Image (tube, grey):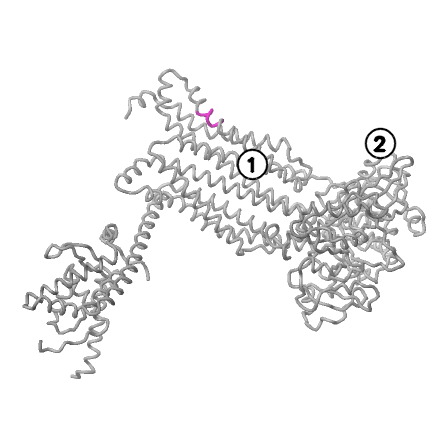
Amino acid sequence: MSKEALALLPGTLDALILKTLSRGARHGYAIARWLEEATDDALQIEEGSLYPALYRMEKRGWIESDWGLSELNRKVKFYNLTAAGKSQLEIETANWKQFNRAVSKVLLPA
Amino acid sequence: MGFPVVGAGRFHSLLWKTPVEREIESELDFHLEMRVRDYVERGMAPEAARAAALARLGNLDRVRVECRRLGRLRDRDLRRAERFAELRQDLRLACRRHLASPVFASLSIVTLALALAAATVAFAACDALVFGPLLFPAPDRLVRLREIDSQGNDLAVSRLDYLDWRQSGESLVALAALLPARRGLTLPNGERVVGVEATASLFSVLGLHAARGALLSTADERRGRPHDAVVLSDRLWRRLGGDPDLLGQMLSLDGRPYRVRGVLPAAVAFPPGVDLWVPLLLDLGPARQPSRDRHDLAVVGRLRPRVGPAAAARGLARLASPATPGSGQRGGVRVTPLADWVVGEGPRVRVLLALGAALLLGLLAGCCIVNLLISRAEGRQRELALRAALGASRGRILRQLTTEGALLALLAAALALPFATAALELVRTRFAELANAAGTAGMAGRGLATSFAAARLAGLAWNDRVAGFFAVAAAAAALAVGLVPALAATRGRRPSLGRRHLRDVLVVTEIAVATTLLVGSGLTARSYLRLRTADPGFAAVSLVTAELDLTGERFPPAVRRTLSPALEARLARVPGVRAVGSTSFAPWSGKRTDPPFLVTWRPPGQPVRTLAAEWRSVSPGFFPTLGIPLLAGRLPRVDTANTPDTPEIEIAVDRTLARRWWPAGGALGERLELGNPGRPVRVVGIVGAIADVSLDTAPRPTVFLPYPRRPWRTLTLVAQAAGDPTRVARAVRREITAFDPDLPLVDVGPLARNRTAALAAPRASLLVLVLFAILALALAGIGVYDLLAAGVDERTPEIAVRMALGAPPRGVLRLVLYRGLLLAGFGLGLGLIAAAWLARFLPTILYATSPTDVLSYVIPALLLVGMALAAGLLPARRATRITPAAVLKGP
């Protein structure tokens, strides 16, 4: 792994998880794997912090969980996006776009 | 934050709930395992793979703790959301059911709201007059003490007895004596301020402290001080400018200087309505030894802990027995709660009656609604069974049904809130008018008490206690109306025996309560009608009275003696005045002889007889002006009586007194003694009895003295008006002011005003009770109707069989009506017993009406029987129209 891993900007983990779940229900490990693959492992996520984030979002009603069977027939918790989660994802995406544009304007002047 | 939006899946996860700890462990284990697997697949050694996976997860302990905390919070939110969702569902169902029968729902809500509002207002009134603090600490220990003569008449307390009591320390922590003050204050606007002479102990007995300066001390009770001290009420102090520098300054009371000692806290006064207190000098000086038979003090005391009024009375009476001569006419001591003096028994009974009636109406409304809810749930047994079969627990169904009833009660409470607020406002304004009309009064008990009650009611408003009562009453209603029908409905599938019994009990209760309210309103109505048509014994309709307060140095007895005929002569010339007289107490002002006047008769060869009487000092014009008939003899002559040296005063007595001692006649010429010590008088005339204290006070034995003989301070001129009394009253006022603008004129007006005021309280009681009774009758009728209709539904097959076997329609009719009458009979019996028991508390407010007045019981009984028959007629008619063939063949 030659690429240097980037630290995650605070607050973006939630958005990433929401985005992950927008493709369908996943268990915790699958979310971690998907994040890894989608970002080409460029982001350094401490996997432990994934779970408190999931519980927090569940409490907020953005996602909900249910027990199901994994690919290997083990009983695991699957997370699913709720309607509130979907709109939260939209908000986070819009916020990110705005943030990105603002920071880019400063750092990469045309 | 609001409640999260919840989907069905979340409930499912909660139903099969794994503990949070296991949930976390299983997730983390799975994660580790999968990661290790991935690493091993990529070719790592298992040990190294595990270490790398653990490192990638980070601080596991911190993750566990954080997840546990968040998980618990999440579950709590979920449970809350679930309960909330259930409640919303129950409320939606309840609303739908109530909207399906809007008449039932709205009638229930309005009835319950009325009862709740009425009870709240009545409670507020009771709180102001009965339950609430009398503004003194530990008021239940405060008593009024009186002596009684051998015939049981109330007497004031003699100074020597007061001193004996005080010295003995018997039963009382402390006691204090009061007298009406001989001097007062006239404010610049002519208003007279009333004061009392009091022992310094008065304030410690009552537990009062000065808001400014100091109160009276025992040193003030000593004779021969250069200046007496005076204590002011907060109200008076403010009227005088509210200047703190007023303390220590001199204040002239009717020309004599007093040094202002201190000011009492706001809104505190005893006796109520009094604004200044000066020391009472018990020691009359060496020259005048008080007689034990001179009864003039009003006495209040604070009981020792755990000593009741009755025990105190016995203890104090025992003190008298070894004592001193002259105790021959003493019968003992009467000790009564101070509240009776302050509030008055009439107002107390009236507000308690209103509260009782409102609570009964609430009970009735509650019973009626519970009954109807049970009846309506009867038709839902299939629905409930279905829900139970689909997995709803009994608790869940109970909650749903409870919500239905409780919703009614809560909506009623919401409606009762503005009702009660409006009613409080109404009471407040009505009594503010009355309190103003009542004006100021002296120490005479009754008028004062009434105006105190009116003043307290004029301040009626929501406060913590009233709000607390409302909340408790609303909660109780919600619980009863919610839970009772729900419990009854979930107790079995079929219309069970228990449920039917419960409904019978409820309807019987309804009828019993309705009976009680009807009897109460009957008694009040009889009393009111008698009071309205009461003949006071004098022509009151077009009478005008003008009351003067001749207290003070400006008006010594000699001046008062000449003032009365001079004013009478002036007023006789006023156009519209037909006749003029004067008396010592304004008629219907509540003022009376308090304590009563002792009249002694020593018939030769017989034991001495005494009685407690009223006295009035009147001019000869008084009797023709009021139209009081002279029954025998002649009126006392003014000229002979006028000379203070006349050894024997001529007096007239009223018929009540004459009948008491000379039932067969013969009072004329008899020699009596008046007062203590006795002054000899001779009866020269017998006149008709008059109820001049107030409209509802029966005439007491009365002695009429010639005014010049006893020129009393509250001179009242009475005039018979030929035209409009209000116009004549204005003319009278102008004439008196023209005669002497500085005369302290307390009040001028037509007497009919006082009559309206006297009728106000009885009318209010009557209105409340009649309104409640009508509602009660209607509610009980609905209850009986519904029960009988349900009975007919239930027994349709049985009735069909009976008819098929030849029972005539009349028989079926009788079957249904009989049940209604049976219920009415039970309820009526219970209600009449309860009413008779409760009526024992009413005599104080019943005028010339016995609490066992037969008509007041018979009419409600007839009304209720009629109601039961009418309510039964509809279901009974329906029963007779059953077609046996159709019913028996089945659908």
Relative height, residue B671 to residue B225 (above, below): above
What secondary structure is marked by label 1? helix
Name the residue rendered at 56%, 36% in the picture: B516
Q: How far apart are labels 2 and 1 at the CA level? A: 44 Å
The magenta-colored residue range is B816-821
Instruction: Please tell me how many numbered marks the rendered image carries.
Output: 2
Q: Do residues under tags 2 and 1 come within 8 Å of each other at their CB atoms?
A: no
Residue B656 is a magenta residue: no
* Amino acid of disc 2: Ala
Name the residue rendered at 81%, 61% in the picture: B552
- Observer-nearest of B734 and B271: B271
Displayed quadrant of residue B732: bottom right
Neighbour tally class for label 1: few under 14, some 14-19, many 20 plus, Cα within 10 Å: many
x%, y% of residue A52? Answer: 24, 65
- Observer-nearest of B385 and B782: B385
In this rendering, position of residue B401 left or right of residue B56: right
Secondary structure of the magenta portion, mostly? Answer: helix
- Observer-nearest of B14 and B835: B14
x%, y% of residue B224? Answer: 84, 66
- The residue labelled by disc 2 is B664
Q: Earlier in the sequence, mark 2 or mark 1?
A: 1
In this rendering, position of residue B12 left or right of residue B536: left
Name the residue rendered at 27%, 57% in the picture: B5
Q: Residue B516 bears which disc, if any?
A: 1
